[in-house]
Structure formats: structure tokens, C-alpha cells
Image: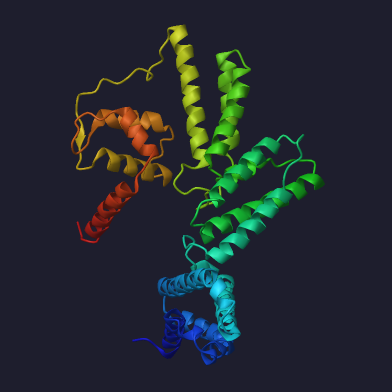
């Protein structure tokens, strides 16, 4: 059963969404007057719930409804601008007042219940444009001098951000991530001016998992260029090992990513470097003619694990196990090659390693949904004593 405060909020939001508030001066004046009272009611309602899950659900519901209404009013204001110019001023003032009050309430929720707001919630279009302008201005202000070693890398970051922000559906989580990244870059720039030691932009991007393709390809090209300047295979391996040590020792912020569905920047670079090291090591073994124990392939007895998983589902499970560090092996290619030798999918006795690898790096939404269903089934089974 809803309590009084919950009813008050629902009645208020339903009143706005019905459009009645725009038709009569008495409604919007009353709403504006009661705005501060509504904020107090939100606090009362929030702390009336017994657990954090219900508190979070309550805030996310109110937050989403406010955004829907703000977007609706903002679009309506744009469409009716010409007709409003010849209509009464009361209607124009009513719309402006309601929109302003809703925006104020939305900001209030963001400031006081930030931990409960859904990071995947899309920002209102009106906030979206102003937030992008402000962020773009901050990024331009932080631009590196042309003679700075990090100048080109920063341009890659800037291009990645501009490309991402040009797409529709900017979320609160993305804007929070980018704002925090900009603040960190600014802090490091100031610190580097005051101290003799220097923190590189590369280190910041690794720590914040800025896994855009532009940045990944650029960092790859830097490593390749340095390795190609060395002639000896042993020295190439040493160079790669230094890069591996430097990258793998960067403390990465948890649950932090520029793109949630790309592999983490550290993990990708470390796996790629390990594969390069293996390539040069195998070259040394090949030309030396010596194969130490354990380097030759183990002859399979032909035994394979039969599963009800499709190749897509298998790839998704492996990806989840790798990124959650349930599987500790770090070389993706070797792991996938091992799996295709010892596992059968639902429809294929022999799985192509290349096919599994392609599906590993391109998980489709339909596959994730199927895997979620399997996981729910496993969770339900785990509740039963075995």
C-alpha cells in the first residue's frame, strides 16, 4: 500500500504528464510553491524503505519519469514556438515555469541521490547539449602543446570523445566518467609542473580504461615502432617484456570504462604483447632446432566435452570468465585454441578456432540474453540442496 508521500509524488507527476498543469495558472503556481516541500517528501520516502534495493528502485523510477517529462515538454516547446508567439503569455510562462521546476528537481535528485541514479539512464536532451558544450570546452582547454610527447595521444582521446558524444543517447554514467577523466588529466598536468617525476597520459588512460579503438591502435603502433627498431629477437622480447611489466602494473579503477562492450585497454594490450613474445620465442626455438620439454603439442586422445551451448554462447561464457578473472589464463588465442580441441558445441563436433575468436570479440545482444537465461537457470538450481 502506498503511503501519503508516495501518493503525493505520483499525483504530482501524473498531473504534469496529463498536461493539465499547462492549461491553468493555478496548477503551475501551486506546483512551483510546493517544490521545496516535494524535495523534503523525497527524502522521507527514500528513507522509509528498509533496504538499499528498494531505495534505488524508487529513485530510478522518479528520475526516469522526470526525464521523460522534461524531454516531452522540451520537444513540445520547440514545436509550439511559433504558435505561442501569438497566444497568451500565461501559457508560455506556465510551460517555462514547469520546465524550470522539473529541471531543478532533477538536479536535486542528482546531487542528493547520486549513488541510486541509474548510470545507464539517458540524459534529457536539454541537459545533454549544455553538458557536451561544457565538457568539450574543458577538453580543449587541456590540450597539450605540439612539442609534448603526449600531444598526439591526447588528440586521439579528443577525437574519440567527440565521436562518442555526437551519437544519440548520452548516459549519466558516460558523462560522469568523462568529467572524472578530464579532472584527473588536469590534476596530473598541474602535478607534473610542480614535481620532477612525470605521470604520462598513457598511464591515466590505462588506469581509467579508456578503451577506444583510436587509442588502442595508437598505443599498439608505439610499441610496434619501438620493437621494429631492434634487430635481435632476444632484445625484442626484452623490450616487449618491459612494456608488459609497465602496463600490467598500472592500477585500473574498478567498473570503469569508456566503452563497456570493448575489452579493457590493459587486458587487450597485455594479451597482444604476450602473443608477440610467444611469436619471437617460437622463432628462436625454430631456428635453434631445440624444443624444450613442454613446448611440443600434447597428443589428444580424442575426448571432447559435449555441451548444449552454441558457438556464440560458448564465446560469451569464455569472455565473461576471462573478464571476471574466473579463468586465470591471460592468452586468449591459446585458450580458444585449447577449447576448440576439447569441446563440442550443440551443433558442431569441430569448432573453428577463428570462428570462436571472432565471436569472442563480437558478442551480440541476442547471445547475451540467451546466456543470461542460462545463468538464471544455474542460479535457480544452486538454491536447491545437492
- Estimate the x, y position of residue 7 in percent, counting from the top left: 41, 87
Q: Quadrant of residue 363?
A: top left
Q: Residue at x 27, y 50 (%)?
A: 370
Q: Is residue 166 above or below residue 355?
A: below
Q: Residue at x 58, y 39 (%)?
A: 249
Image quadrant where one finds the C terminus: bottom left
Task: From the viewer's side, name the closer residue of 124 and 356.
Answer: 124
Q: Quadrant of residue 51?
A: bottom left
Q: Is residue 308 left or right of residue 101?
A: left
Most extreme residue toward the front is 86
Residue 373 visible within the image? yes
Q: Is residue 263 above or below residue 138?
A: above
- Estimate the x, y position of residue 333 in percent, counting from the top left: 39, 30
* Colouring mode (rainbow / by chain / secondary structure / one colour): rainbow
Q: Residue at x 55, y 85 (%)?
A: 40
Q: Is residue 385 above or below residue 96?
A: above
Image quadrant where one finds the N terminus: bottom left
- Estimate the x, y position of residue 293 in percent, counting from the top left: 38, 17
Residue 244 visible within the image? no
Q: Quadrant of residue 58?
A: bottom left
Number of labels in the image equals 0
Q: Is residue 351 left or right of residue 145?
A: left
Q: Residue at x 51, y 51 (%)?
A: 167
Task: From the viewer's side, name the closer residue of 18 and 281.
Answer: 18
- Estimate the x, y position of residue 314 in percent, counting from the top left: 29, 40
Amino acid at each position: 500500500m502506498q503511503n501519503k508521500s508516495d501518493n503525493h509524488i505520483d499525483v504530482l507527476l501524473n498531473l504534469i504528464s496529463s498536461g493539465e498543469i499547462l492549461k491553468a495558472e493555478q496548477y503551475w503556481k501551486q506546483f512551483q510553491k510546493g517544490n521545496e516541500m516535494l524535495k523534503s517528501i523525497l527524502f522521507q520516502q527514500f528513507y522509509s524503505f528498509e533496504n538499499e534495493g528498494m531505495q534505488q528502485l524508487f529513485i530510478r523510477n522518479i528520475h526516469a519519469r522526470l526525464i521523460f517529462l522534461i524531454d516531452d515538454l522540451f520537444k513540445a516547446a520547440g514545436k509550439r514556438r511559433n504558435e505561442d508567439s501569438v497566444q497568451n503569455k500565461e501559457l508560455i510562462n506556465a510551460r517555462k515555469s514547469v520546465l524550470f521546476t522539473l529541471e531543478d528537481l532533477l538536479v536535486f535528485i542528482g546531487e542528493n541521490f547520486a549513488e541510486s541514479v541509474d548510470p545507464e539512464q539517458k540524459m534529457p536532451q536539454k541537459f545533454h547539449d549544455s553538458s557536451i558544450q561544457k565538457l568539450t570546452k574543458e577538453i580543449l582547454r587541456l590540450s597539450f602543446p605540439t612539442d609534448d610527447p603526449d600531444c598526439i595521444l591526447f588528440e586521439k582521446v579528443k577525437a574519440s570523445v567527440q565521436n562518442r558524444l555526437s551519437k544519440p543517447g548520452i548516459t549519466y554514467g558516460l558523462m560522469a566518467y568523462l568529467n572524472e577523466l578530464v579532472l584527473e588529466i588536469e590534476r596530473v598536468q598541474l602535478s607534473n609542473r610542480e614535481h620532477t617525476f612525470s605521470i604520462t597520459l598513457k598511464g591515466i588512460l590505462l588506469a581509467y580504461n579508456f578503451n577506444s579503438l583510436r587509442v588502442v591502435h595508437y598505443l599498439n603502433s608505439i610499441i610496434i615502432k619501438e620493437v621494429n627498431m631492434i634487430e635481435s629477437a632476444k632484445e625484442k622480447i626484452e623490450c616487449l617484456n618491459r612494456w608488459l611489466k609497465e602496463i600490467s602494473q598500472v592500477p585500473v579503477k574498478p567498473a570503469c570504462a569508456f566503452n563497456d562492450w570493448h575489452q579493457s585497454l590493459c587486458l587487450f594490450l597485455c594479451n597482444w604483447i604476450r602473443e608477440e613474445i610467444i611469436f619471437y620465442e617460437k622463432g628462436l626455438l625454430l631456428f635453434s632446432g631445440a624444443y624444450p620439454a613442454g613446448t611440443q603439442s600434447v597428443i589428444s586422445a580424442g575426448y571432447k566435452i559435449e555441451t548444449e551451448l552454441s558457438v556464440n554462447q560458448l564465446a560469451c561464457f569464455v569472455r565473461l570468465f576471462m573478464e571476471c578473472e574466473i579463468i586465470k589464463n591471460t592468452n586468449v588465442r591459446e585458450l580458444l585454441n585449447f577449447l576448440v580441441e576439447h569441446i563440442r558445441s550443440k551443433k558442431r563436433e569441430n569448432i573453428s578456432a577463428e570462428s570462436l575468436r571472432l565471436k569472442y570479440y563480437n558478442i551480440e545482444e541476442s547471445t547475451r540474453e540467451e546466456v543470461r537465461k542460462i545463468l538464471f537457470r544455474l542460479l535457480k538450481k544452486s538454491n536447491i540442496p545437492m
